[in-house]
Image: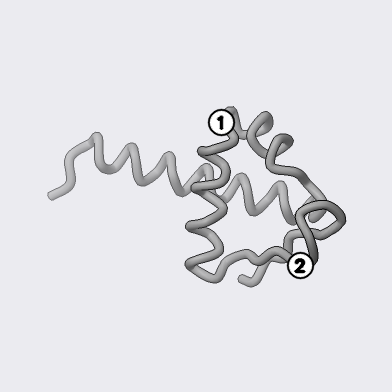
Amino acid sequence: MKSSEETTLKTSKEKTTQKIINLMTKNPDISIEQLASLCSLTRDGINWQIRKLKESGKIRRVGPDKGGHWEICE
């Protein structure tokens, strides 16, 4: 049985990743800085979330960091 702390952490993480996906869907050109601000996370926190989303195949970056865009793969 999971502790309430583990459940809260998982739920929070799922909400954050879904929020990132929603923001990328609305604005594929969104920057890391904008995501960090809108999600109340640090730049490193957003980079970690994005890395996990990429590894799971949910998102991918098309083009360069400047001038590229996010693509949702779900």
Horizontally, is 48 left or right of 64 in the view? Answer: left
- Residue at coordinates 61% horizontally, 34% vertically from top-left? 39
Horizontally, is 15 left or right of 67 in the view? Answer: left
Q: Quadrant of residue 60?
A: bottom right
Amino acid bearing label 2: Val
Horizontally, is 4 left or right of 10 in the view? Answer: left
Q: Residue 51 in the image: x percent, y percent?
A: 52, 56
- Residue at coordinates 71% horizontally, 47% vertically from top-left? 23
The quadrant of the image that shows the C terminus is bottom right
Q: Residue furthest left?
A: 1
User: What label sits on residue 28 in the rendered view?
Assistant: none
Q: Quadrant of residue 35?
A: top right
Amino acid bearing label 1: Thr
Which residue is at the front of the view, 56 or 32?
32
Q: Residue 29 in the image: x percent, y percent?
A: 82, 52
CA–CA distance between discs 2 and 1?
A: 23 Å
User: What label sits on residue 42 in the rendered view?
Assistant: 1
- Residue at coordinates 87% horizontally, 56% vertically from top-left? 67
Picture layout, residue 8 above or below residue 53: above
> Tag 1 or tag 2, which sits nearer the N-term?
1
Q: Residue 50 in the image: x percent, y percent?
A: 56, 53
Q: Which residue is mark 2?
A: 62
Which structural element holds mark 2? Answer: strand
- Residue at coordinates 57% horizontally, 66% vertically from top-left? 58
Which structural element holds mark 1? Answer: loop
Picture layout, residue 48 above or below residue 68: above
Q: Dot 1: within a 10 Å radius of its alpha carbon, few (fewer than 14), some, or many (20 or more) residues? A: some
